[in-house]
Amino acid sequence: MGLIYNENKELIKDYPEETRLPWKKALIIPGQELVEVNCAAISAEEVEKLLLKLDMLAYEANNDAIAKIMVSEADSVLVMVRAVKKEVGGAARFAGIQGAGSNLDIMWLRTEQIGGLLLNKAATAACGIYAQANGTIPWYYATFTAGTAINLMPSQQMDDYVGLIHIGAIDPVVNPIMDACTFTLSGRTSPAQYLPWNVRKAFNEQAMPVVKFELPVLVLPKVTQTLAVHPTVTNGDCKMQLLSILCAKAESLTL
C-alpha cells in the first residue's frame, strides 16, 4: 500500500446512497460554497480498490509532490466516483482495471480526450486542446499572445456517465509561461487562480514544475466546462498538462 492508501484508510467503509450529499471540499458550481451531490451507495471493497488505483496513478516513487497532492483530495475523488455510479445505475460498481462493460474505472485525463466524446458528448468541432481538432495531440504548442487568455479546454459538455476532477497541473519546461487559469462550469466563471510554478526547489530540466489548484474542480456528468489560461509571453514554450482524474464506464475507456 502506498501513501494515498495509508493516509486515507478511514475512507474505507460502506457508504449508503445519499441523494443530497453536501460537499464543499471542491469547486462544483462557482459562487456556491456548498453543493448537494447525488451519490450512489458504494462498498468498502470498492473504496479500497479506488484508493489502490489512486496509489498506482500517483505513485510517490515517481513524483512525491503529485502523490502528496492526491492524498488531500482522495475524498473528493470518491464523491466523483459515487456520482458517476449513480448516473450509470444498475449493477455497476467500481472495479478498476478488472472492470468491463458498465463497471467503473478511473484514469489520468489524456490530452486526446479533451474534445473527445467523453468530455464533449455533442462532438462539437474544434473542442480539442487550444481549440484544435478533436482527438488530436498537438503536443501543447500553440500561438500565444502575452496578456490574452486562451482556452486550453474549449467549452464542452460532459457525457452522461462521465465525471472529471481537476486537481492541479504540470508544465515540464524550465520556465512555464501560464501564470493563471479560470474555470467556467455550467455558465458560471470562477475567480482566476494564480499558478505559482516558480515556488519549487530548483530550476532545471529535472525539477518539473507542479501546481495544485486552490480547490479540486469537480465536473459532474452532463456539466459544461471551459478552462482558460493566461500567457505572460507571446509564443513561448508551453507543455501544460492537467492533473485530472477521469471516471467512466470501463467500456468507454478502451482505445
Image: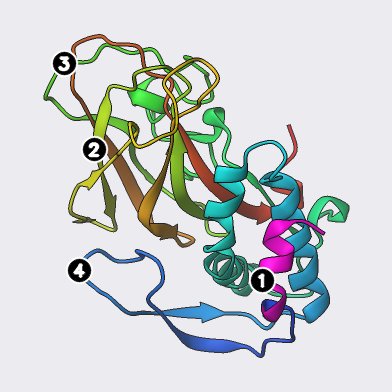
Instruction: Tell me where residue 51 appears, x and y as whole percent.
Output: 72, 63
Taking the image as shown, residue 182 lies to the left or right of residue 55, namely left
How many angstroms separate mark 4 from mark 2 (CA)? 19 Å
Q: Amino acid at mark 2?
A: Ala
The answer to whether one can see residue 138 in this image is yes
Residue under label 1? 8
Farthest residue to the front: give it. Answer: 201
From the image, state whether disc 1 or disc 3 is nearer to you: 1
From the image, state whether disc 1 or disc 4 is nearer to you: 1
Residue under label 4? 31
Instruction: Tell me where residue 161 appears, x and y as whole percent.
Output: 58, 59
Residues shaded magenta = 1-10
Residue under label 3? 145
Residue under label 2? 180
Farthest residue to the right: give it. Answer: 98
The mark that comes first in sequence, 1 or 3, is 1
